[in-house]
Image (cartoon, rainbow, N blue to C red):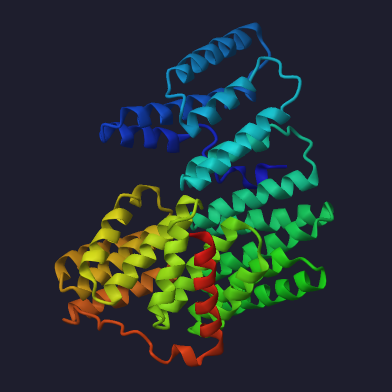
Amino acid sequence: MFGEFEQSANVLTFGAFLDRACLERAREREESARLALGAYVVCRLVGGMFTRDGSTESDEAFEWQLTAVRRHLRSLPADTPESAHLSGISQEVSLSPTTKSGLRLSLTAYAYFLEHEGRLEEGLDVLSLAARTHGDSVPAADFASTALFAARLNRLLARWSPATKCYLAAERAAEQANDAVMQLRARLGRGAVLRGMGNLPMARAIGEEVVQAACKANLPEMQALAYTDLGAVYSVEGKKIEAVQANYRAFRLTEDTLQRMRILGDIGVYLVELGVHDAARVAFEIVLGSKTSFLVRTNAILELMELESSVGNRMAFERRRAAAEEMCERMPPSMLADFHFKAGVGLARFGQTARARVLLSAGLQISETHRLNAWYFRFDKTLAKLDAGESREPERAPNSDWSTSPVLNEVAVGLREYASTTS
């Protein structure tokens, strides 16, 4: 049953872990390289559970492999979260396990950890192993949950076709399980894929449909998720105040801390575009000071980098750019394109045309490779401006009229109040 989306992960070789090990070793980070290698051998160990042929030789080879893997794990630093995950998985592996539920839970927890750390390829590999522990009989609710997870990872990696396939599979399974929340989440996921591919009318229609369905079913968290999706569509359409309003509605509806930080990041972006700089900084600094995921915190750094370049603060821009550059290897394609664009435009604003062209050209290539059409055209247009001698964009002055907008005034006041309660 899970074959519908397993192909999106490298089940046989787990190459993403080996790539990380090689990269860390090249940077002389031996401890990190050993952790990545430990993850690789653990995945190979779990994969071996499903390929044994039942012969005495096969069982003996598997027992030897299990012993060797556990020995390697004991040599890893015991105080790291990844070591704990890997040890927990290895303890759930045995020659004749009576149940695989414990292994499945350990693998799924590790996949979430990898997503949190921005290691999406690795997360797909581990999620695929967790899915295989079900065997041939998978409860519909479990299938829907795992398919949603796989869909999200594929979408973040800009793999539109596998992501859509997973979302559709999740929606069908959620309908079988009579789970309205997962049905709506899968529907929103399809809308996010459409938005990523540039089909805004369809993405907006799905968002509006889910808002109405969630309101009717009294599901405030789903309403919040749908409002954030609508906010993203409004933003691309240039309807910035509507985007702020939609996201602030989501902020007030949700009680999930991670989701709240994501929403604050989006609100900050829209406030920058509207010239409400002080309130935008408040939003981004709240996100940076939180214990949210790598992706959400990194996005806040990128937006602060953009904000400081737009107001002409070169020292602050360079500080944020340097911090973001250190995180590039863990960024998914869309975020990596975002970094190249914001850094390139920022350098151009400060007259660093040659450096800007290098970054923007690299971003153009990333966009073409990963079929990020909207990003591709933005890079192409910006590079054309550089070639025409338009090397410096005007600085953005604060919008002194924003306080006359009831929506923006409500948001600015609300953010200050929230910051005062979390400081």
Is 129 left or right of 365, judged from the image as shown? Answer: right
Frontmost residue, 27 versus 146: 27
Task: Using the rendered view, name the quadrant where residue 128 is placed.
Answer: top right
Q: Residue at x 59, y 70 (%)?
A: 228
Q: Residue at x 35, y 84 (%)?
A: 398
Task: Report x, y in % for residue 225.
Answer: 64, 66
On screen, 413 above or below 178? below
On screen, 133 above or below 216? above
Task: Using the rendered view, name the quadrant where residue 193 is placed.
Answer: bottom right
Badge count: 0
Task: Report x, y in % for residue 60.
Answer: 60, 7
Frontmost residue, 67 versus 308: 308
Is 310 left or right of 11, judged from the image as shown? Answer: left
Task: Report x, y in % for residue 392.
Answer: 20, 79
Q: Quadrant of the N terminus?
A: top right
Task: Report x, y in % for residue 58.
Answer: 61, 12
Is residue 13 visible to the viewer in this orientation of the structure?
no
On screen, 400 above or below 94? below
Frontmost residue, 359 versus 83: 83
Q: Residue at x 69, y 61 (%)?
A: 185
